[in-house]
Image (cartoon, coloured by chain):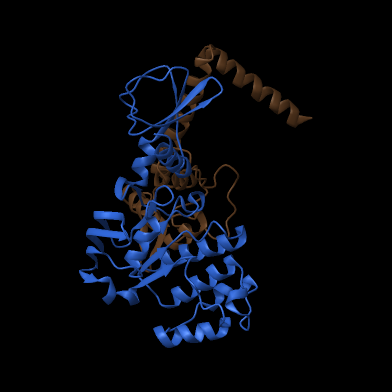
Chain colours: A brown, B blue
Amino acid sequence: MRKNKIIKKGFEIKIDNKSAVPIYEQIKRGIKLMIISGHLKNGDPILSIRELASKLKVNPNTIIKVYYQLEAEGYISSKPGSMYVVDIDKERVKKEKHSFFKRETQEYIAKIVSMGYTPDEAIEEIKKYLTDKKREEGT
Amino acid sequence: MIKIENLSFSYGKKPIFENFNLEVKDNETLLITGINGVGKSTLLRLMAGVLLPDKGSILIDSKPVSESKKRIGFISDKMSLYNDMTVDSLIKFHKNIYGLESFYGSLIKHTKIKYDQKVGKLSVGQRAILHLSLILSQSPDILLIDEVLPNIDAYLRELFLNELLKVISEKEITLVLVNLNFYDIENLVDRVVLLKDGKIMVDEPIEYLKDRVKKIVCEKIPGKLPVIYRQRVGNLDEIFVYPFDDNKEEGDFEVIDLDLTEIIKAFIGGEYVN
C-alpha cells in the first residue's frame, strides 16, 4: 500500500472474484488489516485512488467508495492534493486489533468444535504445538 | 448521459431492436452481453453513430449522436484502419481530421509497431493498440469498445487494459464494453446488461448479480428455485439460480459463489438450452 514498503506475506490485498463479498468490501478489509496489524501507521501516506486502482486492476470508482468508507469509519483522512493518510489513534487500533483476535479465535474454535473436539482439547493442542515449536527452534 | 429512447433498428426485414430503451450514466462502466447475433455490436455501432436508427433516438447529454461525435471514441476490430497507409501517415491523417493535441505515442512504444510499416501488415493486437492510441489522442469522454480483445495475445491485452484503466482513473469517462473477455475486465465493470431477442433481459449492478446468481450442487433439485440453467455432472445436478435469496432458501444442497465469467455463462447457456 505504501510506496517502497514491504508487506509481509498474508497482509497484501488479495481480490477473490469468486467470492460473494463485494470487491470494495474485500479491499476495505485488506487496508483495515494493514492498519491494525501496524503495517501502516498513523500518518503514513497510502496510495492515491489512481495508483491503487491501477495496482489492483479495479475501477477507480471502487477505490473511491473504499476510501470514502474508510474515512467515514475513522481509519484514514484526505489531505489536499487528493492525498490520503492513515488517521487513527492508538487506542482505536488496539481495540480493533483485539476484536480481530476475538473473531479469528471464535472462527477457529467453531471449526474445531464442528469436527467433534472440545474447546479444552483445542487449548491443549495449542499448548502442545507451541511447546514443540519452541523446542524445535531451540535445537 | 447516453439516453436511448424507443429505438427501432432492422437489417433489411430482420428486426433487431423494437422500442428499445437504455440509459448509461456518466462515468459508468457498462458491459453489454448476450448470445451471438443478439445485436450487441449493432447497439454499440448505433451508439457510435456508425449506424442510424430506423426510429427513436440516441441522445448524448440531450444532443443527437451526430453532434457529439468528437466526444465518442469507438473501437472495433471490424473497422478498417486504412490498410494501405503507413502508421506514420495514419497518425498524421488523424491529426488533420481531429486536431489531436497529443498523440499517445508511449502506448505503441513496446509493441514492435514501426512508424514506416503499412497498417495492413500489423497483427490484430498491434492494430487494436494503434487504434486505442489514436482514439485516446482524441480525448473522448465516451469510449465504446467492441469485442477486440479475444484475438490479442496476453501481453498486448494487458497493455490495452492497463491503458484503459489509466484513462478511466485520470478523467471521468463513460465506458461501454461489448463481450470482452470477462475475466480481464471483471473488476472494471459497474453494471451488466444482458440482451435477449432485442430486449434487456438483465440489467443490474455487478455486485447485485454476484450476490444473487449462485450455482447449486445437489442430487435432487429443490422444486421451487428460479433456475436459469442446469447441467449434469456425473450423477449430480448443477443448477444456476437467479435470483437466489440466501436468507430464504434452505435445503440439502451446496451453494457456490460465482465470478462474472460463470454468471454470464449461466445466463447465456440458459438461452441455448431453454
The answer to whether residue A108 is visible is yes
The answer to whether residue B99 is visible is no
B231, A125: nearer the viewer: B231
Where's residue B49, x and y in %?
Answer: 33, 70
Q: On screen, A81 above or below A96?
A: below
Where's residue B238, x and y in %?
Answer: 47, 27
Q: Quadrant of the C terminus of chain B?
A: top left
Q: How many labels does the image show?
A: 0
A61, B201: nearer the viewer: B201
- Residue B233: name its quadrant: top right
Q: Quadrant of the N terminus of chain B?
A: bottom left
Where's residue B268, x and y in %?
Answer: 42, 42
* Residue shown at the point (56%, 76%) measured from the top left: B106
Where's residue B154, x and y in %?
Answer: 61, 57
* Residue shown at the point (34%, 41%) measured from the top left: B208
Q: On screen, B232 above or below B3?
A: above
In the picture as drawn, the residue positioned furthest to the right comes out as A139
- Residue B252: name its quadrant: top left
* Residue shown at the point (52%, 45%) measured from the top left: A14
Q: Is residue A30 left or right of residue B110?
A: left
A83, B169: nearer the viewer: B169
